């Protein structure tokens, strides 16, 4: 699968937030991921943030709310690890939590496997700027014990483009919000 064939639809998100779900669906297809999440926050005066996902999470508000209320504290450790990493380098969930069996049985992972059907994660830092923090999380089907190397390579090919899409979207948002 050629991940670059997904780029036209991914770049559509640069100028319109309405296109994020489609763009992230393209990332999912290009990397064999089931779920894809994207987050970004500007920390330098521009009121800009992105927190979105692919269509896997459409109409799952109850599951998302339950996860946030009960399990989001697990994400804090992962997010700080990812954001402290160099941009575009894959961070496997086992890089953060190396004990596979403990991870598999952890309450948030059990919930995600049962409610959403995902297990393994591969994350990427999309920024090295102290003023702009962004990350990308690819989530793989619960039937997969580990993300496949080819899928990780395809994700690595797409991540610089996701960074560029966010940069353009942030710039476009900053100039259109002043009009």
Image (cartoon, grey):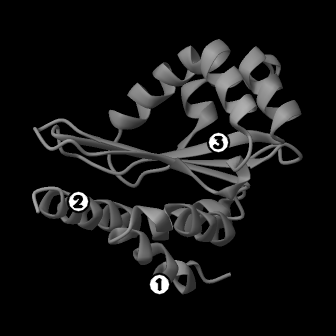
Q: Residues within 10 Å of mark 3 (few under 14, many from 20)?
A: many
Q: Can I make out residue 38 in this image?
A: no
C-alpha distance separating marks 2 and 1: 20 Å
Residue at 81% across / 21% down in the picture? 101
**Disc 1 designates what residue?**
8
Question: Which one is in front, 38 or 172?
Answer: 172
**Where's residue 24, x and y in %?**
56, 62
Closer-to-camera residue (14/142): 14
- Report how far apart the C-alphas of labels 3 and 1 lie in the structure: 25 Å
Find residue 73 and report its horizontal and vertical position in percent: 54, 15
Q: 130 or 71, which is in the foreground?
A: 71
Question: Dot 2: what SS?
Answer: helix
At 11% from the left and 63% from the top, the residue drawn is 179
Q: Earlier in the sequence, mark 3 or mark 1?
A: 1
Residue at position x 44%, y 30% from top?
79
User: Disc 2 designates what residue?
Assistant: 173
């Amino acid at each position: 699968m050629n991940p670059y064939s997904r780029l036209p639809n991914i770049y559509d998100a640069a100028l319109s937030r309405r296109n994020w779900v489609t763009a992230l669906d393209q990332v999912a297809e290009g990397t064999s991921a089931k779920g894809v999440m994207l987050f970004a926050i500007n920390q330098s005066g521009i009121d800009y943030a992105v927190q979105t996902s692919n269509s896997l999470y459409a109409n799952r508000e109850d599951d998302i709310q339950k996860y946030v209320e009960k399990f989001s504290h697990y994400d804090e450790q992962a997010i700080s690890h990812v954001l402290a990493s160099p941009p575009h380098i894959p961070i496997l969930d086992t890089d953060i939590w190396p004990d596979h069996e403990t991870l598999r049985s952890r309450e948030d992972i059990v919930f995600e496997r049962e409610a959403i059907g995902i297990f393994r994660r591969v994350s990427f830092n999309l920024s090295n700027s102290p003023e702009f923090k962004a990350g990308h999380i690819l989530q793989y089907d619960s039937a997969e014990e580990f993300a496949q190397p080819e899928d990780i390579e395809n994700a690595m090919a797409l991540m610089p483009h996701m960074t560029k899409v966010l940069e353009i979207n942030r710039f476009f948002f900053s100039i259109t919000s002043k009009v």
